[in-house]
Image (cartoon, grey):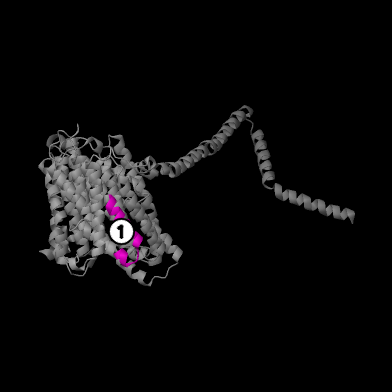
Amino acid sequence: MSQLLLQSVWLIPCYSLLGAALSVLWFPGITRRTGPRPAGYVNVIMTFLSFIHAAIALPATWNQPAYQLFVPWLNVAGLDLTIPIEISSLTVGAIVVITGLNVLSQIFAIGYMEMDWGWGRLFSLMAVFEAGMTALVLCNSLFFSYIILEILTLGTYLIVGIWFNQSLVVTGARDAFLTKRIGDLFLLMGVIALLPLAGTWNFDDLAVWTKTANVDPGVITLVGLALIAGPMGKCAQFPLHLWLDEAMEGPVPASALRNSVVVATGAWILVKLEPVLALSPVVQSAMIVVGAISAIGGSLIALAQIDIKRAFSYLVTAYMGIVFIAVGTGQTEAALLIVLTHALSMALMMMSSGAVVWNSIVQDLTMLGGLWSRRPVSGSALIVAGLGLIAFPPLGGFWAMLKLADGLQASNHPWLVAVILLTNALTAFGITRTFCLVYGGKPKQMSERSPEIHWPMALPMMILLGFTLHLPLILQSLSLLPAWSEINTDMALLLIWSSIFGVSISAVIYLGNYIQKPVQFPVKALQDLVAYDFYTPNIYRGSIVLSVAIISSLTSWIDKYLVDGLVNLFGSVTLFSGQSLKYSNSGQFQFYALTILFGVTALGLFLCWSSLSHLVLTTATALFHQTVG
């Protein structure tokens, strides 16, 4: 049974697409009679089937070599575009994570979207995301991976803008689409430029090619920089990070899916391309610098946010920055482990924030407080999610950070170890700050009556909470974690103390009465710098947006006054000439013939003027010489 399901793993994306297609049946005419709920139920069932299929097939792949299937698509003019599908323990395991989180997010959406009529659109788009992500991990071709990423970019635009009657939602969807398109454009350049160099787009063949590749350093550097631009946009890295913040205007179930596994699609492509990117030290350094800036910057910006969803969204930028550091230093295993632990913890964290927003009807942290006695389930979910994200033993985040920090220390990158420790401390501080503002202190006006969520939202949160707590046991059973006796105790203590330091300092500040509330940075300039996202939007408006506006205005002026002006001038001259000539119309044929003759003669003289001038000058010179002689 497991072998049969393993051989048909490539069908899993079709389950989601079938669910999305069936959702189309619930158009307004049917929805008025049946309600929108059947569209959600159909997609939940199809996603659950995908999860069961992958979960049963996974044991059959363990400790077995990967094998590939090839689907011919296009073969023309020497270009062979065959779709390679890789089936391995890594790809099937990734499908289990994607489908599992998707089915939990859809169950959560049943409760969260209870009174909404947009079920068909939301659930079908979540199914499209699932189909795209599962197809991406199965696809072993850079070209087709790019096509799938483009579909996911379009899906982001549609799902963020699902409540299209709200102006902020429309703006967030538009900005998310355009920001990611910048990275996608450069990625397309890199994909096209890589083919003449390597002769293939297959990831396995690219890894083999890099072992003996002899390419110009400047060329591979430009290609590598273009290739990392796409993942920068997908992973919301500086300076292409603003879209994730604005995408929080969409529904929380979609945000839980997007902040956990959708952003990880860029990290997946980055890991697959690591052998190619390692050919250029400049590209590796660029990834490290981008990752370090994003890790520290994202965790700092999160400290100044008063919107609970945005406070968590910037942590996504921070942790994807750590993934960039891991790939830039060649530690792909640590990168994948960070992606896994981050996906589970962040999905649970977004669900817990959505639970607060759903019942409190507000997401402003300054208007909440004292919810622990009323919301123990949501509060427990946030605690476990936060501890699973930071380096707190024995949860998954601790092992992922420890593996990366050990590798950085072994490769002689002490300053990157400091970046990891600082990011971990700031993340611990930020998560504790949010928890204290929401669940600590005394109840405020908006949180005095805020009962616990109902079971469709609590059930997926508790299931995910259990998986987050038991993730280390699952990894240990698969021999993916080192024994306690083998760990680097010094590095482990540094990570643990950074977590304790961040949590304790934040708890003292936000639960105690030692500092006046609301808490702000000591220097107002620093507070504004962090609160306004390092003025990145202003930089955009003063550089890219201003440049586009100037070029657009200049182009409009040229088109209006030069191009249209010349055309209008020619038309006016023609009209005036015609009006003038009609008064000289005598009806005599010989007069018309004489006029045409004079016109042709004048045109001939004009065209031959240079030749006639040269002939006259030559004749005059000859006569002059004869006269003198």
Image quadrant holding the C terminus, namely: bottom right
Identify the residue at horizontal 36%, vertical 53% (top origin).
Answer: 293
**Secondary structure mostly taken by the magenta-highlighted segment of the chain:** helix
Residue 347 percent location from the top left of the image: 20, 49
347 lies left or right of 150: left
Identify the residue at horizontal 13%, vertical 41% (top origin).
Answer: 375
Mark 1, secondary structure of its residue:
helix
Residue lying farthest to the top in this orientation = 583
Vertical position of residue 99 compared to residue 90: above or below: above
Quadrant of the rendered structure where residue 544 is? top left
| Residue type at numbered disc 1 | Ile
Image quadrant holding the N terminus, namely: bottom left
- In this rendered view, identify the residue nearer to me: 607 or 191: 191
Is 409 inside the magenta-drawn segment? Answer: yes
Residue 179 percent location from the top left of the image: 36, 47
Quadrant of the rendered structure where residue 276 is? bottom left
- In this rendered view, identify the residue nearer to me: 50 or 541: 541
* Residue 344 in view, yes or no: no
Is 74 inside the magenta-drawn segment? Answer: no
Identify the residue at horizontal 28%, vertical 58% (top origin).
Answer: 268
Write the start and end of the magenta stretch as one range.
Answer: 407-426
Residue 382 percent location from the top left of the image: 18, 47
> How many numbered marks does the figure carry?
1
Residue lying farthest to the front in this orientation = 514
27 lies left or right of 273: left
Residue annotated with mark 1:
269
Residue lying farthest to the bottom in this orientation = 212
Residue 344 percent location from the top left of the image: 20, 53
- In this rendered view, identify the residue nearer to me: 578 or 363: 363
Vertical position of residue 61 compared to residue 591: above or below: below
Counting other residues with Cα less than 10 Å from the Cα at mark 1, is it few (<14), some (14-19), or many (20 or more)? many
